Amino acid sequence: MRYISTRDTEKTSPVPSAVTIKQGIAGDGGLFVPESIPGTGQEFIESLIPMDYASRAAAVLGLYLDDYGAAELADCCRAAYSSESFSDGPAPVSKLGDGLYSLELWHGPTCAFKDLALQLMPRLLSLALDKTAESENALVLVATSGDTGKAALEGFRDVGRVRIKVFYPADGVSRVQKLQMATQSGSNVGVYGIRGNFDDAQTAVKKAFADRKLAERLSEKGWFLSSANSINWGRLVPQIVYYYSAYCDLVKSGAIRLGEKINFCVPTGNFGDIFAGYLAMRSGLPVRRLICASNSNNVLTDFFRGGTYDRNREFRTTISPSMDILISSNLERLLYYTAGPEYTASWMRQLSEAGRYRTDASTYSLISNSFSGYYADEEQTETAIRRTFEDLGVLIDPHTAVGVCCAGQYRAETGDGTLTVCLSTASPFKFAQSVYRAITYCKPSDGYEALEEVSVLTGVPIPAPLAGLNERKIRFERTIRPSELQRAVLEDL
Ligand SMILES: *Cc1c(COP(=O)(O)O)cnc(C)c1O
């Protein structure tokens, strides 16, 4: 399997997956995609049913990462998805209601679904350096508004040939998020607060990536800069696995028969998670429909309803912050598979110049065959949290609640009774303040106390990775000015 750019109008030569994982983004600014989508028949799915998650992962990844050996993939998956990291299993399926299921993706070390990709991707990157005969080691820089930074730190911790430095806005993360990062363990990690907001942190990191002098000085020390963001193929490919895994678990429990189609409803921001579901569907996993769930930043809802993508609108800050996005980068990959590289390149140019583009009728019709778009505003999101708790005794976080609300809208509007799986993307304790307010209508405490309040209120224990966070040893306390970032990048190498 080889990879090309979504904007590859020149038909350049395709590259193996290790190159895409090392490089992140294609030379022409496009995203890497597999040259063709592998087909998986019923036997393949049947063969996954008796396996554990790590073995299912190795089998699915083997379809896409054939420049990695089967034993290498098996080792990576076993290490990434161990019971030490995921004590309740990486992706358990539970019942939410009649024909409605939840795929819980937050049982990992940072209690959010990004762990499923970030526990694996660093191992793939480390191997990619050997495979591409790279003489330098990778220094991963991350600017984070909170969740990605912690998940990346946990994933890269103590992985060979890589180091990670995370920069977060000192005024822009919650107390729990700050504690999570400040207490990070590992010998190859660094964490810095940046004076300013998320944009200041991101701008400073982008400047470092563009600085030739810095690259030279790093190279003298044997390092090159790398990133771990969600457009990297190495982060996307592990997400395909849990769509197969959920399907297998539903067959195993007798909820569906093998071959029966199901729907997935996915709380969406950058379009990475739901696009992985699309690849599973195109490969032959029996999926009827992918429901794209957005919050009040509903660019994608409008896109799926009318075929026009228009980011020229007010940015809204919501209680589901990981979905507060107006440019969903991975949508470019869907455009590539439905319209080809010429249209994709042209629409992406229009998006960067005018902030909008309109797809042609045949592309829109192809997309509409697979996707439906819905959104939930803040009040609907809070209602979904409260109702799910009151009616079912199940605690869900605001991102998951957006999905549950949208799945409900879809089912009511279309009358489609197909079994629907809602992806549950974060532990409710990660967003304890919002969850507490939605259930009680009362103001919660600041910081860590809110987790205890939610636990007492609901009888649900605080998950182990978050429990006792306020008692752990602080390792990283430094706050720097944006202008000091490059010095921080170079120190202790
Ligand atoms: C990142 C994130 C999302 C959005 O996923 P995308 O792949 O960006 O669409 C949804 N929920 C949570 C909790 C997240 O952290």
Image: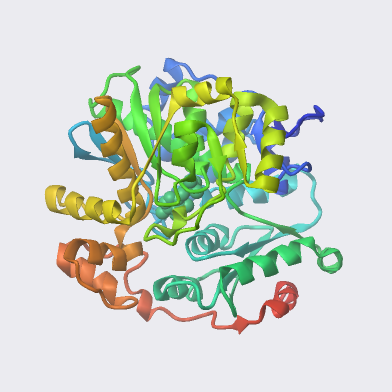
Observer able to see residue 188: no
Q: How is the image coloured?
A: rainbow
If the image is split into quadrants, where does the C terminus sit? bottom right
**Residue 252 pos. (x, y %):** 28, 27
Q: Is residue 385 toward the left or the right of residue 371 in the image?
A: left
Depth check: give the residue in front, 464 or 327.
327
Q: How many marks?
A: 0
Depth check: give the residue in front, 240 or 438.
438
Q: Is residue 413 toward the left or the right of residue 62 in the image?
A: left
Q: Is residue 253 toward the left or the right of residue 245 in the image?
A: left
Q: Residue furthest left?
A: 391
**Residue 6 pos. (x, y %):** 69, 34
> What residue is shown at x 51% (from left), y 71% (from top)?
185
> What residue is shown at x 74% (from left), y 44% (from top)?
29
Observer able to see residue 157: yes
Q: Is residue 24 above or below residue 156?
A: above
Depth check: give the residue in front, 298 or 123.
298
**Residue 454 pos. (x, y %):** 22, 67
Q: Is residue 410 above or below residue 400?
A: above
Occupied quadrant, residue 242:
top left
Occupied quadrant, residue 103:
top left
Q: Is residue 158 toward the left or the right of residue 277 in the image?
A: right
If the image is split into quadrants, where does the N terminus sit? top right
**Residue 321 pos. (x, y %):** 43, 59
